[in-house]
Image (cartoon, rainbow, N blue to C red):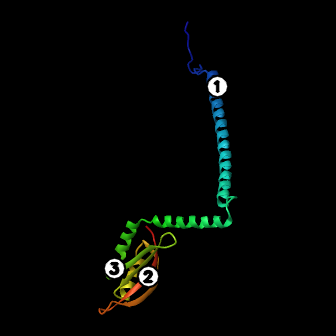
Amino acid sequence: MRFSINLATRTYIDTRLLNQVIGSVITVLVVLMALNISRVASNLGEQHRLAADIVNLEGRLKGKPGDVSEKDFKRQQTSVSFYNGIIERKSVRWLSLLDLVESATPEGVALTLLSPGKKPGELKLEGRAKSFAVVRRYLETLEGTESFSNVLLLSHQEFLLGEKGRGVQFAISCKVQF
């Protein structure tokens, strides 16, 4: 008697166990997804609450406190804005600014004043030169560099250098980009 085993028709995978594992994995994934969805919804609600609180606090900061008179409040606001302007102007990187100005200043120009303007990035230059041609060359040099823009000659006037001759005093306004 001869026994034969047909290996192709025999199932070697326990489908009941496989279905249970797949079902439990899907159940765990659904639970994790539900937890993540609830966490995202909670975070969105918290974000909206915080945004409303920020708007409320900013409104309270902009309005004057109840026990302060309008005159004192306005005076305090102008004082704060004045000091904030000073802080912004002091934030200029002077060494790099001086390097830029020095590299753009030609021979024959002596700068007498270098001051930041009221707006950020604005710079006012005052100085003296031997002639207006030197001032013109200085303006062209400033306009030709990438660091300076909106170069404007505010004023110029001739002055006497004593017995030796004449010179030109000028004022220039420009924007500086570091």
Q: Secondary structure at mark 1?
A: helix
Q: Secondary structure at mark 3?
A: loop
Quarter of the rendering occupied by the N terminus: top right
Residue 42: give x, y in percent of width and height: 67, 42
The structure residue drawn at horizontal position 66% and vertical position 45%, both measured from the top left corner, is: 46
Identify the amino acid type marked 2: Ala
Mark carried by residue 10: none
Identify the amino acid type marked 1: Asn
Q: Are marks 3 and 2 in contact (CB under 8 Å)?
A: no
The structure residue drawn at horizontal position 56% and vertical position 10%, both measured from the top left corner, is: 3
Badge 1 crowding class, 10 Å Cα cut-off, few under 14, some 14 to 19, many 20 or more, is few
**Which residue is disc 2 drawn over?**
171
Mark 3 or mark 2: whose residue is earlier in sequence? 3
Q: Quadrant of residue 169?
A: bottom left
Badge 3 crowding class, 10 Å Cα cut-off, few under 14, some 14 to 19, many 20 or more, is some
Mark 1 or mark 2: whose residue is earlier in sequence? 1
Q: CA distance from mark 1 to mark 2?
A: 86 Å
Identify the amino acid type marked 3: Pro
Mark 1 vs mark 3: in front:
3
Is 36 in front, or is 169? Answer: 169
**Which residue is disc 3 drawn over?**
106
Q: Is residue 163 above or below residue 16?
A: below
Residue 21: give x, y in percent of width and height: 62, 25
Q: Secondary structure at mark 2?
A: strand
Quarter of the rendering occupied by the C terminus: bottom left
Q: Are marks 1 and 3 in contact (CB under 8 Å)?
A: no
Q: CA distance from mark 1 to mark 3?
A: 85 Å
**Which residue is disc 1 drawn over?**
19
